[in-house]
Amino acid sequence: MAEMPASRWSAWFSGCAGLNKGCSARTVRRRRVLVVQLRVFDTHEQLQSRADDWNDLWRRSETALPTGQAEPLLVWLRHFAAELPFRALVVEDHERLVAALPLIGRRGAGVLPIAASAGNQWSSAGELLLDREADVDGAADLLCEGLRALPWPLAWFRGARGSSRAWHLLVERFGQAGMPARRQAMFQVGQVCLPDDFADMERAWSGNHRRHLRKAARRVEAAGGCDLQIYRDLSPAEVEPLVRTGFEMEHRGWKGVAGGSVLASDAILTFFFEQARALAAAGNLRLLFLSHRGQPIAFEYGLAAKGHYFSLKVAYDEAFARFSPGQLLRYRFFEDQSRRAPGTIVDFMGPLSDATGKWVNHVDDVDALMLGTWPRIGGAVIAAMGVARRARNQWRAFRAEGPSVGTAAPLPAH
């Protein structure tokens, strides 16, 4: 397909407003009598009206993150992107959704208008969804067509998993169309695959980790013991007091002192209440509490779906730090989950750290993807970012090593 000037792309996109009235943007092929077509949702209400279809696609997709479902995504949009432009590129096979990509419009570095993935430091939200049983090449081609028609010169997706076949396919098809693309490593996230025999997992840990856990267990048992409560089947009405109790622990610690706890902001707390209710309604919420003499001393806000468990928020009461309550909570939970559902993949969500690295037996890459939706402008920005990144890395290396010091030349003889 010949390159189209940005002005014509903008005009083409404006013409896609009819998609919201049921018109197809583009039909790429006919299989039997079914038509594969692209639609664009540009209001939250349109997403809400197709929530059941969206969630059915999420179930057929490779992604296991429950926040990719319609209701958690809508909660995030209402709280963090209510005033931002919204687009969802949706591919249908007849009336069955086979691909979806939610986007918000914002300004990168406060200047450049970009299309961005939903999600922030508080929570992931929205995922690239691709039906594994559909014509994935045709669906990816249509998503690329939709990206190229966006009114933003650059699409920037932070948090794309390296293990995701859907993201690899989208970037591959985008590049095959001659469009500029860049993948930039962000961090690695730790994962644990829970075995049938929990003892096998314990033997794989370092000796220091095993000794630390045994010492913590002896200390807490000598002081009266501890109990693990796992809330798996909460109704939405039961969520709020438990979530508040967990985040009160976080607020009493260093995050509360620094003003970065959930309870430091009424708006953020309200977001988590609403998200937790939506996840509980779908059966994906897990709230974990470790209690000592009836008092909660550690907490985890987790998500579960498709054989995965995601650790989204953790907290512990620093007054009981001598018991290593956060580590004991994980130990008890992994032991219980290994017995109930062996093969569960636990995902720590954030960057690999000393606290999580003790447990992991696998890592996944987390990347930022930049796609030049307007080739000239977007491509220039991507190229400039690559140059800036290389210069920054060279400067850091120079500062770390210091300037080379040569041997002083001998003074001339007189």
Image: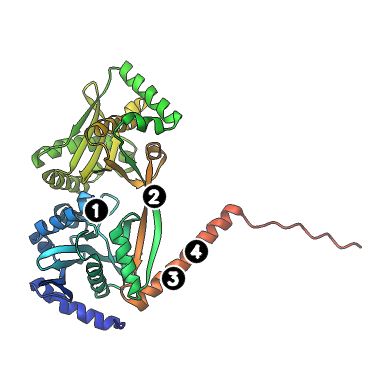
Q: Which residue is pictured at 54% across the width and 61% down the height?
A: 394
- Tell me, for residue 390, which label it has, or none: 4
SS at mark 2? Answer: strand
Residue 205 position by quadrant:
top left
Please tell me which residue lies in front, 2 or 51. Answer: 2
Mark 2 is surrounded, within 10 Å at the Cα level, by few (under 14), some (14 to 19) or many (20 or more) other residues, namely some
| Residue type (three-letter) at the residue carrying disc 1 | Thr
Secondary element type, mark 3: helix
Q: Residue furthest right?
A: 414
Q: Secondary structure at mark 1?
A: loop
Identify whether 16 is placed above or below 91: below
Q: Work out how far the residue at label 1 is from the one at label 3, CA to CA, in angstroms.
A: 32 Å
Nearer-the-camera pick, 25 or 218: 25
Q: Could you say which disc has been placed on residue 384 in the image?
A: 3
Query: Label 2: which residue?
Result: 188
Q: Quadrant of residue 81?
A: bottom left
Question: What kind of residue is marked 2?
Answer: Gln
> Which amino acid lies under the numbered mark 3 shown in the image of this protein?
Ala
Which labelled disc corresponds to residue 63?
A: 1
Q: Is residue 385 left or right of residue 44?
A: right
